[in-house]
Image (cartoon, grey):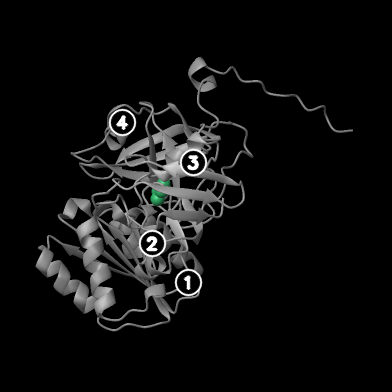
Amino acid sequence: SPAPWIPIIAAVSENQASLPAMSDTGNSTPLRIRVASIDSLSPTVRHFRFEPLDDLPESQLPTAQPGAHIDVQLPNGLVRQYSLINGPGETDHYAIAVKREPASRGGSQALHEQLRVGDLLASSVPRNNFTLRRDAEHTHLIAGGIGLTPLLAMARALHHMGRPYTLHHFAAQDTELLFQSELQAMSGEYLCHVGLTPSQTAATMAELLATPDAHQHLYLCGPAPMLQCARDTAAACQWPEHTVHFEYFSNPEARDDSSAFEVDLARSGLSLNVPAGQSLLSVLRENGVTLPSSCEQGACGTCRVTVLDGTPDHQDVYLSESEKARGDCLMSCVSRARSQKLTLDL
Ligand code: FES
C-alpha cells in the first residue's frame, strides 16, 4: 500500500495571511505569489519573476494566453496591470518587465523601489483583452517602448508555433531595445526604429502599412501618440478594422462625467440613477452589482457591459470606432449615456 500522505503545513507569516483573497469590487486576487528574482534589463526597466507561493514541486500557476495581463496588488496597496511576457507553456512562474515611469502614479515606483526578492504579493489570474489570432497568414507586431511586453509574449508564441510574423520595435533610444538577442534568434523578422521624430514615425508607419491585407493582422501596443498614429495610418491605408488590434497603457483622453442618466438592469430588475461626477461602475457596485474592473479608465475592456437599449456615450479607448458606432456595449468605468436612459444586460 502507498505510504501515507504527510501534509506539509508551512508557517504563514502575518503579512501573507493578511493578503486580500477577494476585494469587494469583484476583482479577485486569488493567487499568492513570491518575488523570485528581479533583474535590470536597462537603466529604467526591470524584469520581475513571480513564482507560486507553494513550494510543492507540482505547484503551477494558471496558464496565460499571449497578450494577457495580471492585476498585481502592490505593497503600497495599489493594484496595477502588467502584461505577462511568459513564453508558451511556462506555468511555473509569471514574468513581467516594468519601466520606471518618471511620472509614476505609484505603481512602477513601488515595483522598482520597494519590492525585494522573497516578498509576497497577491495577483489575479491572467486576463486577456488583447488576444492573438493564430490563423493570420502573417502577423505584424508593432511596439513602442515598453509596449513591447505583450507583443514579446505573442512573438514567443508565434515562433513556437512556426507562424510567420514581423516585429517592429519603435524606441526613443537604444537602451529601450529589450530582449534583442532573443528576438534576433527567433524565426520572425525583427526590425528596430530608434530615435525617430513624430513625423519620421508617421512616415515609417505609412511605409509599413502601405499594403493592407484582410488575411494579415496588426497588433499595436505603445504610448498613446504612437498608437494613434499607427491606427490612423492603418485606417488611411484601408486595413480592415477587424485586422487591427491595439492595447493602450492608459486612456489619454479627458473624461467628461458631467451628465446624469438612468439605467435599467434587465436581469436584476433594478432602476438606478447615475449622477454627474460618479461613474456607472461605482453606482452599480454601491447597489450590489459587482463587476470586475482593472484599469478603471476605459483602456482595458475588463468592465465591459452589454447594452440592450439606449445610446452610450463611450469615453474609452478600448473599443474600435465601429464597435462604438454599434452601441451594443460600453465600458462601465468611463462610459455614460447620450440618451436619457440605458438598459443594460445585468
Ligand atoms: Fe478597464 Fe473599465 S476597467 S476599461
Q: Position of residue 316 (x, y in %)?
A: 34, 55
Q: Which of disc 4 and disc 3 is earlier in sequence?
A: 4
Question: Which mark lies nearer to you, 3 or 4?
Answer: 3
Amino acid on which the number 1 mark rests in the picture: Gly
The residue wearing badge 1 is 162
Q: Is residue 45 above or below residue 141?
A: above
Q: Which of disc 1 and disc 2 is earlier in sequence?
A: 1
Q: Residues within 10 Å of mark 1 (few under 14, many from 20)?
A: few
- In the image, taking residue 254 as reference, residue 165 lies left or right, namely right
Q: Residues within 10 Å of mark 4 (few under 14, many from 20)?
A: some
The residue wearing badge 4 is 110
The residue wearing badge 3 is 284
Q: Residues within 10 Å of mark 3 (few under 14, many from 20)?
A: many
Q: Residue at x 52, y 54 (%)?
A: 344
> Can see residue 128?
no
- In the image, taking residue 288 as reference, residue 255 lies left or right, namely left
